[in-house]
Image: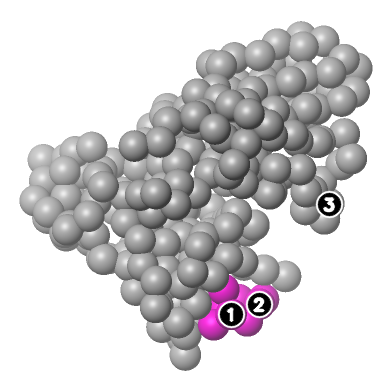
Amino acid sequence: EVQLVESGGGLVKPGGSLRLSCAASGFTFSSYSMNWVRQAPGKGLEWVSSISSSSSYIYYADSVKGRFTISRDNAKNSLYLQMNSLRAEDTAVYYCARDPGGQIPAASDYWGQGTLVTVSS
Amino acid sequence: SYVLTQPPSVSVAPGKTARITCGGNNIGSKSVHWYQQKPGQAPVLVIYYDSDRPSGIPERFSGSNSGNTATLTISRVEAGDEADYYCQVWDSSSDLWVFGGGTKLTVL
């Protein structure tokens, strides 16, 4: 059974940093691209970042470029999102999602349950 | 940047057919994916590559894509289909994923 479990969310002050993790199991993690997608309270889905299976291709939304860094450790079946210079508008539930795509992201076929990040003073 | 436009809400009676549109400039040239999200839950992929259905998704869910509009069609709507639905495309000109604003499906 495919499982994706996010962790690392919490309350952080504006300008602060946070590192999200996503533990994957039930599939060959190293064969899949992965995505981070967020959802602000009461709002729609917003794509954040994508990384290909071997980390050769990495993409960011304009809203987080230069502040967030996506990475993965295939040996640990884990995906990460390092978030720096956090702003109030980064407050959201952050989902990790599996993506069968390669250089070009495809659809996200499995999603975790999300972790809440709150940026507030 | 590429913009996807969805109606904020669609209402349909049980047993009828719901059509949720996703508009975008020449969207027919892109691959469209659709997600269903129920309150408090993670999104679920219901249609990928315009019209393919993942395993476990009922045949009542179908998709089409042509011109400037992609459409998610739900036949014989059930109360359990009530949810938010989002369309998504990969914009290769900017290397960005784009989501539509979402459509709330209400089953009357």
Circles 2 and 1: CB distance less than 8 Å?
Answer: yes
Q: Which residues are magenta?
A: A25-32
The Cα atoms of the two marked residues, 2 and 1, are separated by 9 Å
Q: Name the residue carrying label 2.
A: A27
Whole-percent x and y of residue A60?
32, 56
The Cα atoms of the two marked residues, 1 and 3, are separated by 22 Å
The Cα atoms of the two marked residues, 2 and 3, are separated by 18 Å
Circles 2 and 3: CB distance less than 8 Å?
Answer: no
Whole-percent x and y of residue A54?
45, 82
The answer to whether A9 is drawn above or below residue A69 in the figure is above
Q: Chain of mark 1?
A: A
Q: Name the residue carrying label 1.
A: A31
Mark 2: amino acid: Phe
The answer to if A28 sits in the magenta stretch is yes
Q: Residue at x 70, y 11 (%)?
A: B11
Element on which disc 2 rests: loop
Q: Residues within 10 Å of mark 3 (few under 14, many from 20)?
A: few
